[in-house]
Amino acid sequence: MSYKNSYKNLTIGSDPEIFLKNEEDDSLSSVIGIFNAGKLDPMDIGNGCYVQEDNILAEFNIPPCTSKEAFLESMNYAKDYISLIIAPLSMKLHFASSEMATDDILLDEKAHVFGCEPSYNSITENMIEIDPDEIEGMKMRSAGFHIHIGFNNDYTDVNGDLIEVEATDEERDRIVMFFELNVTLPLLLEDVDDYNRRKFYGKIGDMRDKKYGVECRSLGGYFLKDDDSIGKIWDLTLKAVKMAKESTISNEELRADISKYINPKEDLDIGKVNELLIKYKKTEYVNS
């Protein structure tokens, strides 16, 4: 199957999560009670952005973007808004992909609500569901930098009318696998993930189907830290789309190839990750 006519009308959006810390002693803090907004009723903060509380973390949404400049502008707008609200409380944003919470910020029952719905793994082709028994009493909290890639296919019919076609499952799986090869895996050792977020969330291949495209869920929240990192995510995502579009390898071959080097159910082996990246990119990204 050729994908040369796929991935048109591209947009990139995000719904990342951010830790908060106390300014005075740099200890981890909680967002609970600051915005009083949840997944079902997020707070509209303007410019197409929304903010909500997710466990002890702040989460925000930006609108779909068609340029790197718009992506950076929206990300900074939401980050700045949250910073402005928490500054009078002597709090600041903290960029990491996982942290260990202390008992004093886990007293509220909302700190024990993990709102993630089941997702799907494009490599194993299985659903991903978190076992409540596994996370019972767990103090580790994780932050994701989920990337939403919107696209469709259009063609002109016999009457000259432009017809838009929704993304297919094959196109969604393909873009996630190339996202891992171009974005998440090359950035592994840059990530500040001291408590191994991927043991529970954001395993390689983790995704959710969206009507407009796909949500790639493996990237950690550390990369929200500055414009250089956010801009790099934009650039590498475009690279992933380009490779998904132009590569002649089938999804079945790609999935089988990745599976030789990576088992999403196990910790990542940096040596094997490098072998995989060298094979596909002719470049070693991860320093072992």
Image (cartoon, helix red, strand yellow):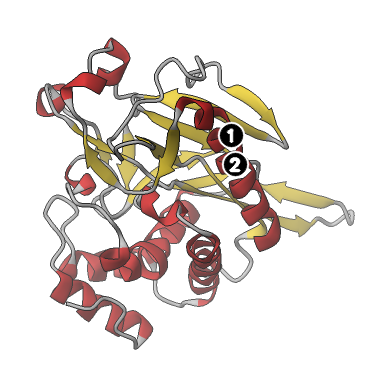
- For the image, the number of numbered tags is 2
**Residue in the picture at 11% in, 54% down:** 266
Q: Is residue 260 above or below residue 51?
A: below
* Residue that extends furthest to the top in the rendered view of this protein: 109
**Residue 67 appears in view:** no
Q: Circles 2 and 1: CB distance less than 8 Å? A: yes
Q: Is residue 175 above or below residue 100?
A: below
Nearer to the camera, 251 or 283: 283
Q: Amino acid at mark 1?
A: Leu
Q: Is residue 125 left or right of residue 271?
A: right
* Residue that extends furthest to the front in the rendered view of this protein: 24
**Residue in the picture at 14% in, 28% down:** 138
Q: Amino acid at mark 2?
A: Asp
Looking at the rendered structure, which numbered label has been put on residue 280?
none
Tell me the crowding category of disc 2: few under 14, some 14 to 19, or many 20 or more residues within 10 angstroms, Cα based.
few
**Residue in the picture at 41% in, 54% down:** 173
Q: Is residue 242 left or right of residue 188?
A: right
Tell me the crowding category of disc 1: few under 14, some 14 to 19, or many 20 or more residues within 10 angstroms, Cα based.
few
* Residue that extends furthest to the right in the rendered view of this protein: 159
Cα distance in 3D space between marks 2 and 1: 6 Å
**Residue in the picture at 60% in, 22% down:** 43
Where residue 143 sits in the image (x, y, percent)? 34, 41
Q: Is residue 262 above or below residue 110?
A: below
For mark 2, what is the residue?
Answer: 80
Where residue 49 sits in the image (x, y, percent)? 64, 35
**Residue 141 appears in view:** yes
Q: Is residue 211 left or right of residue 109?
A: right
Nearer to the camera, 129 or 225: 225
* Residue that extends furthest to the bottom in the rendered view of this protein: 282
For mark 1, what is the residue?
Answer: 84
Q: Is residue 20 above or below residue 181?
A: above
